[in-house]
Image (cartoon, grey):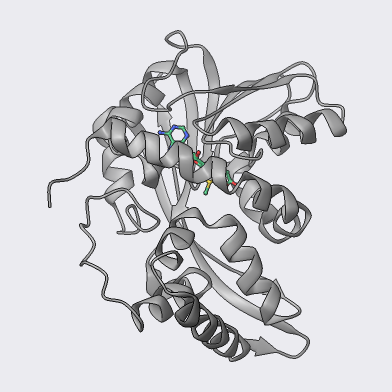
């Protein structure tokens, strides 16, 4: 089957993430608490400090853009860009609710950044770049909009085997239906999981001092039912696979997901491992 054109991927991404915006708002508090450590890591890797002007790519409902805004303070500013307007509406409501007026969100494709050359002091991005049809093009755009010596900090998912949090439902869906062997170059959750791949793209775009680390953690749930419901509410790519199952298959698959998640119980919590590839680089001075 021919690969979809970049604009087709972009349109599907926009639709997918707009569809789950309500789910992200519903579970916002929970995921904010569970994944805050990743935002802090990005803020550190991007060397954010008071007064900087920051660009966050694929901000969704505001991660890590909101923490970036708190870090740079009112003397600085943050712009968050995302395809999905409905995700950004949630982000905008959250910014207003905590009184952050130096952050703005705008709809757009991060592959073609609508900003002047050398106009930002840092770029951050969490769980977005692997969904792009043209990642190398985006890397070149990032280096263009950064000022000399400025840092980019990126978080993407590492290998599926190290991410039971995401892999459990995918494996169980595959017990019911045959899915085509994924094209390793096709946009998707694990597109940038291979060590060195994103770092190589940043090098090729002109970044120096490129670093990469697999950052391990977990997402913790009191009950397995919440794991199932939250993931189905927010993970657009998994929802797309889930929709291929019949109602009867979904009922059985849900039971299997809950049963498998229970095997990760440690005392009062179910701790599902995650592995995130953190990649950072500096534009030469
Ligand atoms: C998994 S969400 C991550 C959102 C947020 N950064 C976070 O970590 O919570 C992926 C986001 O990337 C956005 N996205 C995907 N492709 C994009 C593109 N080409 N340009 C801008 N945003 C994109 C989606 O709309 C979605 O909001």
Q: Identify the residue at the far top of this view.
A: 116
Q: Residue at x 32, y 39 (%)?
A: 9
Q: x%, y% of residue 259?
A: 58, 90
| Front position in the image: 196 or 173 | 173
Question: Left of 109 or right of it: where is 232?
Answer: right
User: Which image quadrant: the C terminus?
Assistant: top left
Q: Residue at x 38, y 47 (%)?
A: 130
Numbered label tally: 0
Question: Left of 225 or right of it: where is 113?
Answer: left
Q: Identify the residue at the far front of this view.
A: 247
**In the image, residue 227 above or below residue 128:** below
**In the image, residue 74 above or below residue 96:** above
Q: Residue at x 44, y 56 (%)?
A: 237
Q: x%, y% of residue 206?
A: 29, 27
Q: x%, y% of residue 263?
A: 58, 91
Quadrant hosting residue 251: bottom right
The reply to whether residue 210 is in sight is no
Quadrant hosting residue 222: bottom right
Question: Left of 99 or right of it: where is 84?
Answer: left
Q: x%, y% of residue 137?
A: 28, 28
Quadrant hosting residue 79: top right
**In the image, residue 5 above or below residue 35:** above
**In the image, residue 5 above or below residue 267:** above
| Front position in the image: 119 or 59 | 59
The reply to whether residue 1 is in sight is yes
Q: Residue at x 62, y 89 (%)?
A: 262
């Amino acid at each position: 089957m021919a690969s979809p054109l970049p604009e087709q991927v972009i349109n599907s991404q926009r639709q997918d993430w707009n569809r789950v915006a309500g789910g992200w708002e519903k579970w916002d508090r929970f995921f904010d608490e569970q994944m805050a450590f990743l935002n802090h890591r990005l803020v550190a890797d991007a060397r954010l400090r008071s007064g900087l002007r920051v660009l966050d790519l694929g901000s969704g409902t505001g991660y890590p853009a909101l923490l970036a805004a708190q870090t740079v303070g009112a003397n600085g500013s943050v712009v968050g860009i995302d395809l999905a307007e409905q995700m950004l509406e949630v982000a905008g409501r959250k910014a207003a609710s905590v009184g952050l007026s130096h952050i703005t969100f705008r709809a757009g494709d991060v592959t073609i950044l609508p900003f002047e050359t050398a106009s930002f002091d840092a770029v951050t991005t969490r769980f977005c770049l692997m969904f792009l049809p043209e990642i190398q093009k985006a890397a070149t755009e990032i280096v263009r909009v950064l000022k000399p010596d400025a840092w980019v900090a990126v978080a993407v998912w590492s290998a599926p085997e190290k991410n039971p949090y995401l892999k459990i439902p995918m494996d169980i869906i595959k017990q019911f239906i045959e899915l085509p062997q994924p094209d390793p170059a096709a946009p998707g959750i694990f597109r940038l999981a291979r060590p060195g791949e994103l770092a190589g793209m940043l090098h090729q775009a002109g970044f120096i001092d490129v670093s990469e680390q697999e950052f391990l953690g977990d997402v913790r749930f009191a009950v397995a039912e919440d794991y199932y419901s939250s993931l189905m509410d927010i993970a657009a790519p998994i929802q797309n696979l889930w929709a291929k199952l019949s109602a009867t298959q979904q009922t059985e698959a849900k039971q299997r997901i809950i049963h498998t998640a229970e095997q990760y119980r440690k005392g009062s919590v179910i701790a599902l491992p995650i592995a995130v590839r953190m990649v950072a680089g500096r534009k030469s001075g």
